[in-house]
Image: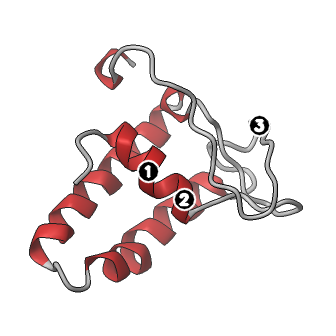
């Protein structure tokens, strides 16, 4: 469904885990510059794709409940990986993703 982790983050994660004005959600548009984020988001992408094939009727619910909510909570919490990153948002807006220069293999 998503050919790369970048597409997965831009098209699924950024929509499902938006920042909300006045909230504690943290995010970095250049998330790929944070090694922990790359590791966790790549793991999430691979698990999403595996679940999509193994549980076609319920994969989204399973993914969000068991995997996405946990790892995104770790990444976005105050004091987490993105805690020092500035965020600009409006209520219920998807997270911003800056265009990728090159490939993630170069990170």
> At numbered mark 1, what does the secondary structure look like: helix, strand or loop?
helix
Q: CA distance from mark 2 to mark 1?
A: 7 Å
| Separation of marks 3 and 1 at Cα, in angstroms | 24 Å
User: Quarter of the image holding residue 55?
Assistant: bottom left
Does residue 42 appear to the left or right of 94 in the view shown?
left
Q: Which mark is residue 11?
A: 1
Name which residue lies at 24% across and 61% down: 47
For the residues labelled 3 and 2, the Cα–Cα distance comes to 22 Å
Label 3 Cα neighbours within 10 Å, binned few <14 / some 14-19 / many ≥20 = few
Earlier in the chain: of badge 3 and badge 2, it is 2
Horizontal and vertical percent position of residue 48 = 27, 62
**Circle 2 Cα neighbour tier, 10 Å, few/some/many (<14 / 14–19 / ≥20):** some
Q: Are marks 3 and 1 in contact (CB under 8 Å)?
A: no
- Residue with the mark numbered 3: 84
Q: Position of residue 96 (x, y in %)?
A: 63, 41
Q: Residue at x 34, y 24 (%)?
A: 104
Q: Which residue is pictured at 26% across the width and 85% down the height?
A: 58
- Mark 3 or mark 1, earlier in chain: 1
Mark 2–mark 1 contact, CB under 8 Å? Answer: yes
Q: Nearer the viewer, mark 3 or mark 2?
A: 2
Residue 19 is drawn in which quadrant?
Answer: bottom right
Figure check: 94 above or below 84: below
Indicate the quadrant containing the N terminus: top left, top right, bottom left or bottom right.
bottom left
Q: Which one is nearer the viewer's eye here, 79 or 31?
A: 31
x, y percent for residue 86? 79, 37
Residue under label 2 = 15
Q: Residue at x 42, y 38 (%)?
A: 38
């Amino acid at each position: 469904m998503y050919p790369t982790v970048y597409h997965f983050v831009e098209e699924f994660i950024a929509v499902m885990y938006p920042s909300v004005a006045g909230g504690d959600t943290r995010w970095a548009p250049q998330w790929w510059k944070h090694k922990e984020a790359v590791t966790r988001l790549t793991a999430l992408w691979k698990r999403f794709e595996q679940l999509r094939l193994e549980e076609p009727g319920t994969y989204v619910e399973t993914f969000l409940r068991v995997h996405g909510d946990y790892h995104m909570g770790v990444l976005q919490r105050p004091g987490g990986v993105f805690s020092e990153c500035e965020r600009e948002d409006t209520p219920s807006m998807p997270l911003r993703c800056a265009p990728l220069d090159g490939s993630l293999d170069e990170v």
